[in-house]
Image (cartoon, rainbow, N blue to C red):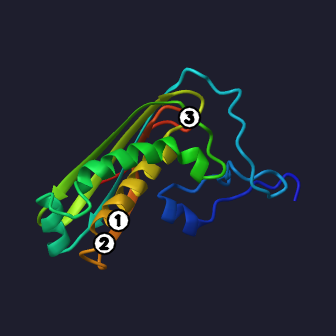
Amino acid sequence: DVGETPRLHEKHAKSWGRALCTVAPRLTHVGKDGRAVMVDVSDKPQDARRMAVASGEVYLGQVAYDLVAQNALRKGDALAVARLAGVMGAKQTANLIPLCHNIFLSKVHVDLALEPARHSVRIRVTATAVGPTGVEMEALTAVSIAALTVYDMAKAVSKDIRIADIQLESKSGGKSGDYQRAG
């Protein structure tokens, strides 16, 4: 009805960790007619510094982990290949995700760390750019592609590999402000 203020349902407020508010959240990639749209960023500052950090983990199991740690896989150095694949993935984000903008990335840093207690590889990516839109999707894509590359490099020795916990850790710059994952 006209004049009625939309309310955020209490169940959503709890799951999103927000207090109840009088304005419902709006999906930016959905137009007034309900169709998917690319966000117009032409009016946003072209010189805004953006940064995003994303992470994920690849659980290898004992056998695959030992081979990765010893750089003894038949395909080669899984960590070096995954590091490069992560950078390449970040650069291809707009080609992989339909409504993402092409971004001129300033830097993509992919860090892979062996986690002996969990027989896993921890992936952390920092993506930076200067421009009108954020780099969260580039950081998340880089983590995803690096994780898939570790999987590909080690799949010959284990089919029980698991990719998990791909998530945004933090972001800075932009209209929505800074974000830091709790915990």
- Give the CA separation, mark 2 to mark 3: 32 Å
Give the quadrant of the N terminus.
bottom right
Residue 12: percent from left, percent from top: 57, 65
How dense is the environment of label 1, judged by Cα within 10 Å: few (below 14), some, or many (20 and up)? Answer: some
Q: Residue furthest top?
A: 47
Residue 152: assigned label: 1
Q: 178 or 92, which is in the foreground?
A: 92
Q: Which mark is residue 103?
A: 3
Q: Residue at x 68, y 33 (%)?
A: 41
Cα gap from disc 3 to disc 1, whole angstroms: 27 Å
Q: Are marks 1 and 2 in contact (CB under 8 Å)?
A: yes
Element on which disc 3 rests: loop
> Alpha carbon of mark 1 to alpha carbon of mark 2: how far?
5 Å
Tag shown at residue 26: none
- Residue at left 67%, top 54%? 24
| Left or right of 11, for residue 70 | left
Q: Earlier in the sequence, mark 3 or mark 1?
A: 3
Discs 2, 3 touching: Cβ within 8 Å: no
Residue 160 picture location, percent across and down = 29, 79
- Residue 86 image position (x, y, % from top left): 38, 48
**Three-letter code, disc 1:** Asp
Q: Classify mark 3: residues with Cα within 10 Å, few (<14), some (14-19) or many (20+).
A: many
